[in-house]
Image (cartoon, coloured by chain):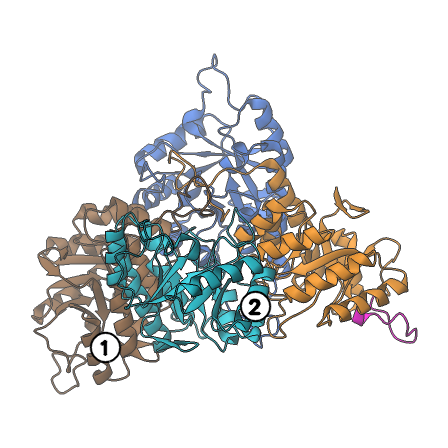
Chain colours: A orange, B blue, C cyan, D brown
């Protein structure tokens, strides 16, 4: 059971709703993923424009917890404004702080992320900041009261998977709130790896929506997250140079 | 559906039966893994010594295909003798050629493996040779008529996972028979990775039997193999340096 | 030629002076490294206690530029105090901001590092902040006016080398001031790699002082830094899957 | 001092002579590399056709030891024929067995390589076989009497560097003859890494001839090989998860 603030989830896979070829594929992918948390960029909402197609039109809004993100914000103030807009729509119960600090790499801005997290916590939000894998920054976000920490595995949409498992491990080990690995997941092995490192969940979008067969990939990701979690709980064998070696490697690059 | 010679399998996970703490745990792990192929070292059989405990005593022999291996053989001749011994027991339908060429690393002997494969094929066996990830050697084994190729991911029991995904990819791409990645798998992400590279199956033992909770790890591995296979079929996103990069990485280290 | 603030250096290797077995070995290692910049923790200075042995007693103070660091500081204020203490000694012309935010991993505190950098710049120091490889944080440090950026390759003293070449590349590409890769370098290949990525210099200490033969390792590191720099300038071949592949990999994991 | 058969070399860098833009650049690169061993494909020799330009026309033949290779051979017999052709020219004292078993990947044929090595040893050649990183195959080549073993780091011309440092380490540890890492070196860090693993030398060609500035890269490689060798001799620090960890990693992925 994953608990974030007052929310509880059976599934440890958070799925982004963007960039699907059409809403039918989106819906089917969401279904087979068995996710309980759907994320989306608030700026993509058009709930106040009822004449426009709704990007969640095929989704049963009662079935899911929605995690809007503040993508598009460059500052803490903008992020707060976006979060409040989402909140006012009534379907959003949590907010993912996403403040991009670099348009080329889409990596997050640590200072504005800290600030926005603090402001949104003061407003009573359940706050999940997307952050780099800076270990001390992650701790500071938790100290502010963040309800979960969302470190990136690699740049958004890059599909490069987990570049720095050491930093993710450090973040996971020090955390007393859930750690959701976010951004950069490219394939099932990456999602399994994040979970094996002890992450509490994984958030991904492009890896599914951009796959040749998004529905099948959604199913793969569901299994990968379950598999990695079980592997973490089962306690893997130590790394050894050879099986005949007397002592195990105490490696982190597990 | 995985076809090796005349055999057909739904499951793509082959499980070794050795080194479990006891036969109850062994049985339970085998059950939850949903494997259809069990491997074991013929030298561990004591079918001719009915007063000794049978290492498969808890296993329903009708439910599984057995893949005995020739571990302990140092030469092709020894391997053939061991294979015939297994064959005479009546429960064995295929043989995994395993001829260790180095006691320290447990890496296979390419020359004796080639020779044993040829001899056993001449005897009518369904032959699956365990081999290094030497790409040309793998092709030669197939040219001899091997029914599947079993390249190692890393040394037996090391848990190091896939060290050289490039060689495995080359072997998979050139093969017209199934490729079962064997040896070195340490955790679910490794099994998923092998399958994502396009392997037709994974064989593992220590990763399950040596886990803190072998039964839970068996379940994790079952899901990992399914997940990786689905991921392969679904067609993953390309690697990009950043999502905003104009062109994808054509990397093999996916 | 490496220029940092008003300083110019031929050598791109910065060497730490701590943890040598004795001052003779320290001196010899410093000599053969041909470094021009020596770093040390101000708290290890005992220039005000003339009865104590001086940890630089064998070093010709006229030959080197000294880069004191603020190790031991937990806050920006402490770092400023330490920097001023160093400055008052008269031998120190620059300061490396080093504010550890985690006693276990020795990773830096991004918030206090930003603050200290700003304060010390206001005091007129030439400031080189040691930082994580957070890309946006590095840019903010430069925007404050830092004279060089010192991202870590991996945790201090870990010898793990460059875990995240992508982040280092991003930092190097965006920077208009020198980037000195600091912390985690374990062997010559790591130093060469940092330079090949385009770093302007490398700072290391344990890799030399902790080697079995520190003097020989100092020489190795000197050559590695030169080699990596030349390799960067020479323009390496692209990565290809095979030499017969039609198109190169555009990988970053070069 | 590197000894191979009756030959002794100060330099541990073997340089290929192919694919340079012109012979002036080739000569200059050879000069600054300070190599003592030049390799070339016998089939590119035109010593019997004096009207054709000589691909070594700028090279002082007295200054170097020449290591012709048998590239182009698909079988042991062809390799022997090529080696004898080179021998009859009088400038060649050793032969590198190079029998490609796969046109796409340019990976070597283990069976023909073994056979050619045996045949050429019987003919009295000093024989250096290019081989995959199959550990048992490398031992068999040494048992035949090969004067050095030349395992590949990655496919010829790929620039991917050392993909499997574990196998190279095993080969180096078991060998009683020199190990020269051959093929796949892309940049100075790769050459340094091979030497740090304990290799006795490095052979490369494309990494220099294909660089934007081949002469500068030749110099970089010279320094990288020296640096890696010194680093090996100096004894690097152990890998640790953090410097504050109680026990070092016993990793091989150093």
Name the side, left or right, on which A81 lies relative to B242: right
Q: Percent x, y for residue C55?
A: 32, 53
> Quadrant of the rendered structure where residue D37 is?
bottom left
Name the side, left or right, on which A49 lies relative to B66: right
Q: Secondary structure at mark 2?
A: helix
Quarter containing the N terminus of chain A: top right
Q: Secondary structure at mark 1?
A: helix
Q: Nearer the viewer, residue D55 or A54?
A: A54
Task: In the displayed orientation, state which residue is furthest to the top.
Answer: B51
Residue A44 part of the magenta segment: yes
Which segment is the magenta one?
A42-56
Q: Which residue is mark 1?
A: D29
Q: Which residue is mark 2?
A: C119
Q: Percent x, y for residue D154?
A: 36, 61
Residue drawn 38% across the image and 47% down it: D252
Q: In this picture, is D30 found above or below B123?
A: below
> Quadrant of the rendered structure where residue A105 is?
bottom right
Q: Is residue A4 visible?
A: yes
């Amino acid at each position: 059971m994953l608990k974030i603030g007052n929310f509880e989830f059976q599934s440890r896979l958070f799925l982004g709703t963007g960039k699907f070829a059409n809403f039918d594929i989106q819906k089917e992918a969401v279904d087979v993923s068995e996710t309980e948390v759907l994320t989306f960029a608030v700026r993509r909402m058009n709930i106040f424009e009822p004449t426009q197609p709704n990007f969640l039109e095929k989704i049963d809004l009662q079935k899911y917890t929605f995690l809007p993100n503040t993508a598009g914000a460059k500052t803490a103030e903008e992020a707060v404004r976006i979060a409040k807009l989402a909140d006012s729509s009534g379907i959003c119960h949590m907010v993912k702080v996403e403040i991009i600090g670099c348009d080329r790499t889409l990596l997050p801005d640590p200072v504005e992320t800290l600030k926005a997290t603090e402001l949104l916590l003061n407003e009573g939000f359940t706050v999940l900041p997307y952050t780099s894998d800076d270990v001390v920054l992650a701790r500071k976000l938790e100290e502010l009261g963040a309800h979960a920490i969302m470190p990136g595995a690699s740049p958004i949409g890059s599909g490069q998977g987990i570049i720095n498992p050491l930093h993710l491990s450090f973040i996971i080990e020090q955390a007393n709130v859930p750690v959701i690995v976010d951004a950069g997941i490219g394939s099932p092995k990456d999602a399994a790896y994040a979970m094996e490192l002890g992450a509490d969940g994984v958030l991904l979008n492009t890896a599914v929506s951009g796959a040749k067969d998004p529905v099948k990939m959604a199913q793969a990701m569901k299994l990968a997250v379950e598999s990695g979690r079980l592997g973490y709980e089962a306690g893997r064998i130590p790394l050894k140079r050879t099986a005949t070696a007397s002592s195990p490697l105490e490696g982190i690059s597990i």
